[in-house]
Amino acid sequence: DAGVTQSPTHLIKTRGQQVTLRCSPISGHKSVSWYQQVLGQGPQFIFQYYEKEERGRGNFPDRFSARQFPNYSSELNVNALLLGDSALYLCASSLPREGPVNEQYFGPGTRLTVT
Amino acid sequence: AQSVTQPDIHITVSEGASLELRCNYSYGATPYLFWYVQSPGQGLQLLLKYFSGDTLVQGIKGFEAEFKRSQSSFNLRKPSVHWSDAAEYFCAVGARGGGGNKLTFGTGTQLKVEL
């Protein structure tokens, strides 16, 4: 079975530009989460989406937004890019269910460089 | 708010030697704990998880971890390290809050294996 896929693999943008990153979850998974991993740090939670609705948001500015589509794929948008947005953006999918927090399965990430 | 501390930034072991990576967490309720591994330029792979029950959990690739509530720890162990285990290891605590399902990661431990 295919794992979580992300596109593009690498991206170079200029300060002030906008970027869209894409994610397809594992087949059968209905929840997608986005994380930002700055070099030398652990991933930081940005958003979780389930059934096309935002279910959680981390401490990120409004320049960051996301959406989920009927096929459960997702896009992350970042406006007015800053140098500090340079990072590896990771998408994770999970099976939502009641009870324990679900294990999340990560894609390979999109490396964004802002110049 | 939950947090994770990984005290060791870098660890070097010889191939065949045993390994223990430390993780301490802070969380007010029952913690859901995870270990992930990340190879250079790759996403995160789930090694093992603790939700409840037996405090010694087994994972993939011969790894195990022990949950100690009294010490707020979830250390990762492997009896005999292989050169292919060289990677970065992240401990994470999961939480449900505000409808979301997010992971909070430590800053990681970089493992180097000497042949």
Image: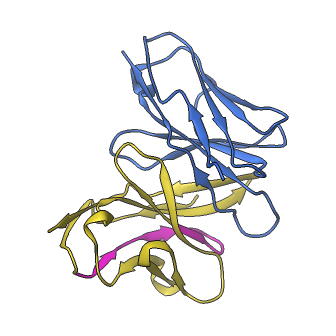
Q: Nearer the viewer, residue B84 or A94?
A: B84
Residue B55 rendering spot, x and y as whole percentages: 55, 87
Chain drawn yellow, letter?
B
Q: Quadrant of residue A63?
A: top right
Q: Is A2 situated above or below A15?
A: below
Residue A73, quarter of the rendered image: top right
Q: In this orientation, does residue B96 appear?
A: yes
Residue A58 showing in the rendered view: no
At 45% from the left and 80% from the top, the residue drawn is: B64
- Give the colour in which the image draws chain A: blue
Residue B39 in the image: x percent, y percent? 37, 52
Residues rendered magenta in the picture: B17-34
Q: Quadrant of residue B80?
A: bottom left
Q: Is residue A39 above or below residue B14?
A: above
Tell me which residue sits at (50%, 43%) in the image: A108
**In the rendered structure, does residue B23 fall within the stretch colored magenta?**
yes
Percent coordinates x, y for residue A98 in the rendering: 82, 65
- Does the segment drawn in magenta span residue A27? no
- Find residue B19 and report its horizontal and vertical position in percent: 29, 78
Q: Describe residue A64's horizontal placement relative to residue B11 as left or right.
A: right
Q: Nearer the viewer, residue A77 or B78?
A: B78
Farthest-out residue, left:
B115
Indicate whether A10 appears above or below A47. above
Residue beneath the point at 58% across and 35% down: A6
Foreground of the two, A88 or B70? A88
A62 or A12, which is in the foreground?
A: A12
